[in-house]
């Protein structure tokens, strides 16, 4: 795709997703408490391991340093993990610096249009930068650090040092951002919570880690994280600690932030919109369902004129631009 080449996303990778599927066997990966993580450790033929690991180190150098191999001189591939949960089936690569044992991860996945669109929209219209590369049917993604949302809800949500109002505020903003940008299926295990100590409190940021439901579903609730049962602890926190007025305030703040980013990236967004208009990213039935659902939700019949997902996204963005100007 010319768009990906223009913005240095398209590269020639030394290792493809298909190359990693050539393992003969695998063993379950357990966590430190002996529980099954739903990831497996593939076992590759001995004569293939060296070439595979060298190729993966080159991929990491391309992802992190534009291909400068000096950054991997003292690194080695400790482990390749394969996820059997869900329909994505990514590979997670653990790479370690042998000089100080500091490690990092990156992911190799099957490239699909929804995921690429999702990462581009996230990169352009959210407060988060996304680092990835694509080569035909292979996608390489940088690891996004953070506590998985489901783990955070079970273990950290009631932490006495964490301000529940700040957590609730972040979830409201995240919910609004997903709804405007049409990012679907943001259940708790599809996002992570990043925690940053500040001089007098902790700051929180929710970051998506899976983008394969961008622009696809017709049910508008799929684009609202508040409706997933896995996210109920966050919803409950908001109901307990926020008022209707503060809900609206945080939604408006997030819409305003998106408008500022849209203005600075308007040409690139326009290019992406033009490509999306020509792509059959979803079905006519789902597009009709979503346009009718949003028309009713916003009391805005202009959605009924949308003939594709690009039109719906564009109208979403035009709506918030008008709101910010009011």
Image (tube, rainbow, N blue to C red):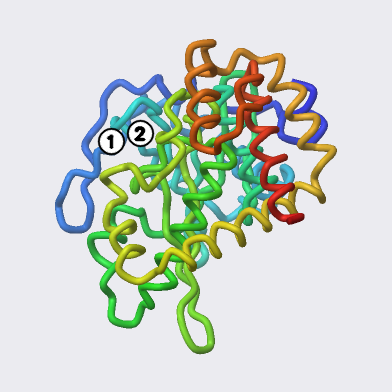
Q: Does the CB distance between marks 2 and 1 fall below 8 Å? A: yes
- Quarter of the picture containing the N terminus is top right
Position in image of residue 317 (x %, y %): 69, 40
Q: Is residue 114 above or below residue 33?
A: above
What SS does tag 1 mark?
strand
Q: CA distance from mark 2 to mark 1?
A: 5 Å
Query: Which image quadrant is residue 160 in?
Result: bottom left
- Quarter of the picture containing the C terminus is bottom right
Residue under the image location 82 percent in, 50 percent down: 264
What SS does tag 2 mark?
strand
Instruction: Kindly tell me whether residue 54 is visible in this rendering.
Output: no
Residue under the image location 45 percent in, 26 percent down: 20
Left or right of 146, for residue 125? right
* Residue 321 or residue 185, whichever sits in front: 321
* Residue 269 or residue 134, whichever sits in front: 269
- The earlier-in-sequence mark between 2 and 1 is 1
Left or right of 29, for residue 13? right
Position in image of residue 96 (x %, y %): 48, 55
Residue under the image location 34 percent in, 43 percent down: 227
Residue 40, numbered label: 1
Residue 82, numbered label: 2
């Amino acid at each position: 795709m010319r768009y990906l080449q223009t913005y240095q996303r398209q590269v020639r990778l030394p290792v493809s997703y298909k190359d990693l599927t050539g393992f003969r066997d695998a063993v379950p990966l357990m966590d430190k408490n002996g529980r099954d993580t739903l990831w497996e450790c593939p076992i590759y033929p001995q004569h293939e391991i060296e070439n595979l690991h060298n190729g993966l180190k080159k991929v990491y150098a391309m992802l992190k340093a534009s291909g400068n191999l000096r950054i991997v001189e003292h690194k080695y591939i400790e482990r390749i993990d394969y996820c059997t949960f869900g329909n994505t089936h990514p590979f997670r690569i653990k790479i370690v610096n042998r000089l100080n044992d500091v490690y990092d991860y990156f992911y190799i996945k099957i490239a699909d249009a929804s995921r690429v669109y999702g990462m581009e929209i996230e990169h352009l219209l959210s407060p988060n930068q996304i680092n990835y590369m694509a080569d035909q049917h292979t996608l390489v993604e940088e690891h996004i650090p953070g506590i998985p949302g489901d783990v955070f809800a079970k273990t950290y949500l009631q932490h006495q040092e964490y301000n529940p109002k700040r957590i609730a505020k972040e979830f409201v903003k995240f919910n609004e951002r997903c709804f405007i940008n049409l990012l679907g299926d943001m259940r708790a295990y599809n996002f992570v919570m990043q925690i940053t100590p500040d001089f007098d409190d902790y700051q929180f940021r929710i970051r998506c880690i899976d983008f394969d439901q961008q622009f696809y579903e017709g049910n508008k609730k799929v684009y609202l994280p508040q409706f997933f049962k896995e996210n109920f602890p966050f919803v409950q926190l908001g109901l307990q600690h926020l008022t209707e007025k503060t809900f609206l305030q945080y939604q408006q703040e997030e819409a305003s932030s998106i408008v500022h980013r849209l203005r600075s990236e308007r040409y690139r967004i326009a290019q992406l919109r033009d490509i999306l208009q020509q792509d059959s990213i979803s079905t006519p039935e789902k597009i009709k369902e979503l346009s009718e659902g949003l028309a009713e939700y916003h009391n805005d019949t202009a959605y009924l004129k949308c003939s594709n997902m690009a039109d719906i996204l564009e109208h979403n963005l035009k709506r918030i631009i008008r709101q910010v100007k009011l």
